[in-house]
Amino acid sequence: MRFSSLIFLSSCFFVTTSHAQFAPEILSLKFESQSYSAIASIDQTIHDLEGKPVKNGNIAFTHNQLEASATDGKWEYSLFQRYDYFLRFNSDTAELAYLLRNDIPVPENRVYSVHLRPNHIRAWGLGLAHQFDITPSIDGKIRFNYLRADKTTDGYLKGQFQSLSTGYQTQLRLDYGYSRDTLLDRKEEDTDGHGASVDIDLEWQATKNIAFSLKGRDILSYIKFKDLTYTQANADTNTISFDSNGAIDTKPTVSGIEGYRGQTQRLPHRYTLGGRYDINDNTGISSQLLSYDKIMFPRLGYTSKSPYISWHTDYDFRSKAIGIGIRHPFFSFSIRSDSLKWENAQMLELSISSRIVF
């Protein structure tokens, strides 16, 4: 067991045993999924852009987490599994990937600037959170997470692709660590990464009817891999030509190295800034600004309340997605999409939670 995990587990033991008795007041189970693609539907993005022409955009991501937690006073203990995939790219890279995947001829005399940065993990983890009061009207919660990752992709592909009448020329640089090589089909190997991340929540009840909130996820993070498989390569395909149909006949020349190295991975920051105004005891309006690695999603919503259940609906201006949700003291459910057909959706979110209060 790594030193970082020993520290974390020892801390959990110390905090737990420092109480006279550990008697959880709340047991919770939660699943959340959030996916978005700026260039195509989520389904088409998963299938390597096969299908309709892509749109302009520079981001695609998915975050999925299943978590069980127990709350004892101001302390919260969690066990979770998460799966994240984050892609940063430019419009040239998206267009070129679409053309190649669908065997469409590349326009002649066109220069493409290639830039792609993948960031992917699959990990299980333990969370330890503590709630605290800053002032009578401001509450906070800080959470430390231990992460153990068995899947990863982290690195970049960048360079230039030029289409000519006689063929094309490329100068591409690849440098990435991975558990599975999706570009050069290297055999998948076992991966073992250990790390940590920090989350924070702040709630401010400014007046009786006005409240603000800030949630930060992975505001600090690292995952260290000791012997991670990696590839550093230069691709030169300036001798390749087009076939009779105008499509690329690819026989790339690749030079570089493959091996094992230590590598540290950082996770994208996720922030949610919220505001709420209660018109009366039964209705209210809200605003929300989601930031996923500095990509902004502004939202505006409306809430209707009853003694035991509240209903919520909102609109995301970036993705043009509509969200609806229901909340009860013992369960909650929400969904958001920009299409009634899931296979056409570019934004898709789902959250389900339940809890038992003792």
Image: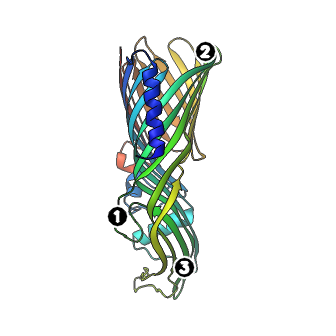
- Label 1: state its secondary structure: loop
* Amino acid type shown at disc 2: Asn
Distance (Cα) linking label 3 and label 2: 60 Å
Write down the residue under mark 3. 170
* Amino acid type shown at disc 1: Glu
- Label 2: state its secondary structure: loop
Residue 48 in the image, given as x and y percentages of width and height: 40, 62
Residue 319 in the image, given as x and y percentages of width and height: 51, 44
Is residue 53 in sight in this rendering?
Answer: no
209 left or right, relative to 307: right
Write down the residue under mark 2. 209
**Could you say which is closer to the camera, residue 33 or residue 321?**
33
- Residue at 43% across, 29% down: 13
Q: Which one is closest to the eye, mark 1 or mark 2? A: 1
- Residue at 45% across, 48% down: 194
Task: For label 1, count other residues whose C-alpha is less than 10 Å away and answer few (under 14), some (14-19) or many (20+).
Answer: few
- Residue at 49% across, 20% down: 74
**Could you say which is closer to the camera, residue 230 or residue 42?**
230
Task: For label 2, count other residues whose C-alpha is less than 10 Å away and answer few (under 14), some (14-19) or many (20+).
Answer: few
The mark nearer the N terminus, 3 or 1, is 3
| Viewport quadrant of the C terminus | top left
Q: Which one is closest to the eye, mark 3 or mark 1? A: 1
256 left or right, relative to 339: right
Task: For label 3, count other residues whose C-alpha is less than 10 Å away and answer few (under 14), some (14-19) or many (20+).
Answer: many
How many marks can you see?
3
Residue 340 in the image, given as x and y percentages of width and height: 37, 42
**Numbered badge on residue 188:** 1
Q: Which one is closest to the eye, mark 3 or mark 2? A: 3
* Amino acid type shown at disc 3: Thr
**Could you say which is closer to the camera, residue 174 or residue 214?**
174
